[in-house]
Image (tube, rainbow, N blue to C red):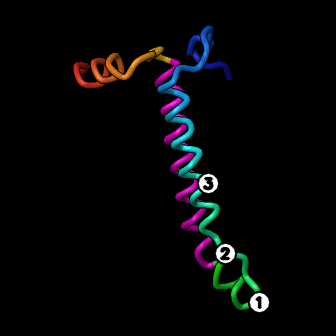
């Protein structure tokens, strides 16, 4: 299935690069916060929270994906243009 979005014909802007880094940092913090279990009981205790971890990871990844599509669709190159596009649209 092909998207109706235009393909990127320019390099990634500073704003896009910064926002990608922020999302990457957020996902990294989710993963780094996990501790390696030492026993089977600790492993089972950790696995009880895996569902919530997976949901949080998926939500952040989904928000990043939608953010990326927004920048591709509207070709926002500066923060001022982004603000005027999002604030003045109804």
Q: Position of residue 78 (x, y in %)?
A: 40, 18
* Above or below, comparing residue 84 to residue 58 in the picture: above
* Quarter assignment of residue 46: bottom right
What is the quadrant of residue 34 in the picture?
bottom right
| In front of the other: 85 or 6 | 85
Question: Looking at the image, do the residues carrying marks 2 and 3 touch, with CB atoms under 8 Å apart?
Answer: no
Report crowding for label 1: few under 14, some 14 to 19, many 20 or more residues within 10 A (C-alpha): few
Q: Which residue shows up at 61% across the image and 79% down it?
A: 48
- Name the residue rendered at 55%, 59% in the picture: 55
Mark 2 or 3, nearer chain start: 3
Q: Nearer the viewer, residue 72 or 12?
A: 12
Which residue is the site of mark 2?
35
Disc 1 vs disc 3: which is toward the camera? 3
Dot 2: element: loop
What residue does disc 3 label? 28
Tell me the residue at 49%/17% (across/down). Answer: 73
Residues at marks 1 and 3, CA–CA distance in whole angstroms: 25 Å
The N terminus lies in quadrant: top right
Residue wearing tag 1 = 39
**Where residue 44 appears, x then y in whole percent?**
69, 84
How far apart are the alpha carbons under marks 1 and 2?
A: 12 Å
Q: Main secondary structure of the magenta part?
A: helix
Residue furthest out toward the top: 9
Does residue 5 lie above or below 56 as drawn? above
Residue 17 x/y as whole percent? 55, 29
- Residue at point 58% right, 20% down? 12
Magenta stretch?
Answer: 48-72
């Amino acid at each position: 299935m092909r998207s109706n979005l235009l393909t990127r014909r320019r390099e990634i802007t500073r704003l896009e690069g910064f926002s990608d880094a922020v999302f990457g940092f957020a996902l990294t913090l989710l993963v780094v916060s996990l501790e390696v279990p030492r026993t089977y009981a600790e492993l089972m205790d950790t696995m009880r929270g895996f569902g919530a971890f997976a949901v949080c990871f998926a939500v952040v990844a989904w928000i990043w994906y939608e953010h990326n599509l927004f920048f591709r669709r509207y070709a926002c190159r500066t923060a001022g243009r982004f603000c005027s596009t999002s604030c003045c649209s109804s």
